[in-house]
Image (spheres, helix red, strand yellow):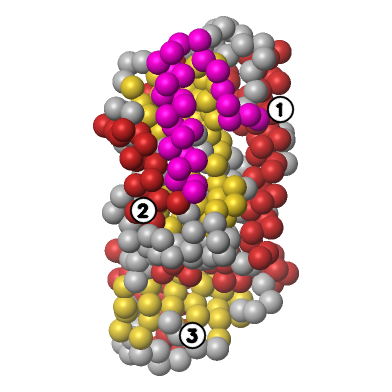
Amino acid sequence: MTNYILKDENAVFYECGFSCDNALFLKLGEESFFLTDSRYKIEAKEKIKKAQIVEAKNLFEEASRILQKHKIRKLYFDPCELSVKEFETLKNSKYTYFEPSADFSKQKRIKKTNKEIKLIKKAVKLTQNAFEQYASYLKRQGLGKDEKRLHFECRAKLSDTGRYDLSFDPIVAINENAAKPHAFASKKELKIGSLILVDAGLKYERYCSDRTRVAEYSQEITFDKKDQSFLSSKRQKVYDTLLKAQQNAIKAVKPGVKACEIDKAAREVIEKAGFGKYFVHSTGHGVGLDIHEFPIISAKSQTIIEENMIFTIEPGIYLPGEFGIRIEDMVKVTHTRAAVL
């Protein structure tokens, strides 16, 4: 792919090491162009070394002029990124044929470099530490707080009071609210014996992490250990089933297998335990500059797993009106297996 245009911030950052909320990146053979407005021109010049900085009021009109000037015959674009108006402006270039290629930037990023792996590992470690700080807060002050306050405190612990950006808005859900895979915070209060689910992650130098833990609330609550005990036999059965399913899926990871085989390894355990219809999402997803990247670990995915891919393994069981449990870790594919980050 010699000639292409990008608008997505993370896709642009991957190409040139800088992005902002009003920019385009043009790759035309050996030449690269970073188009932005006057607000970002100075910082772009400071941080971008391998692209020409072009200031413009209308980025797509300027991109069209550059395409005509260089007489570009074919340009790849991601139709998921551009609005109809933006594309109509861009295609005014009379020489150029525009070739749609959905998610081609994410496809380029599906295998991580050594530098990216180090940054993601750091993000994972910081998230792990933040989870334990959050568990300490719950021990000291969590009793009687509702999900909205617990959500606020989770954000504070993850960001280290603003030091880090978050990978996504955290999920903090209690009891039956945890049966909603992406629950919104409610006024449900944390009590002794409550089941609490926490799904959260932070970014380190733009690279994301993602982790989910579930525990039963007491003064001994911790998210550090995955062997959790529950007073309810039903909760315990669901949790133990999920832990076994996750371990089974992790064991299935190695170069050369299809992503759907990893999903199957988790799903079979859950189905055998009688909870198959309550596992309502895929087993995992890639993580990098975006919180959801390739590969997708689902029942339909035919992606062949390769070394240095990084993705989540996160089976879940959700019993409407009762509770939900999900256990999530990120793994890196080595030359023989999955290494849990």
Q: Report the amino acid beneath label 3.
A: Leu
Residue 331 in the image, given as x and y percentages of width and height: 55, 50
- In the rendered image, residue 233, in percent from the top left (x then y), is placed at 43, 13
Query: Looking at the picture, how far across and down is residue 48, in whole percent?
Result: 67, 72
Q: Mark 1 — residue?
A: 133
Q: Is residue 14 above or below residue 158?
A: below
Task: Residue under label 3, please give it.
Answer: 28
Report the front residue among 266 and 127.
266
Cβ atoms at labels 2 and 1 below 8 Å apart:
no
**Magenta stretch bounds:** 224-251
Q: Quadrant of residue 273?
A: top left
| Residue sitting at x 69%, y 43% | 125
The residue identified by callout 2 is 261
| Kind of residue at badge 2 | Glu
Query: What residue is drawn where x is 33% and y is 40%?
Result: 268
Of mark 2 and mark 1, the one earlier in the sequence is 1
Describe residue 322's horizontal placement relative to residue 22 as left or right.
left
The x, y position of residue 65, in whole percent, is: 43, 83
Residue shown at 43%/37% (left/top)? 245
- Name the residue located 40 percent from the left edge and 19 percent from the top edge: 323
Kindly identify the amino acid type of the residue bearing the numbered disc 1.
Gln
Helix, strand or loop at label 1? It is: helix
Q: Is residue 59 above or below residue 254?
A: below
Q: Earlier in the sequence, mark 2 or mark 3?
A: 3
Picture quarter with the N terminus:
bottom left
Can the viewer see residue 271 in this picture?
A: yes
Does the CB distance between marks 2 and 3 fall below 8 Å? no
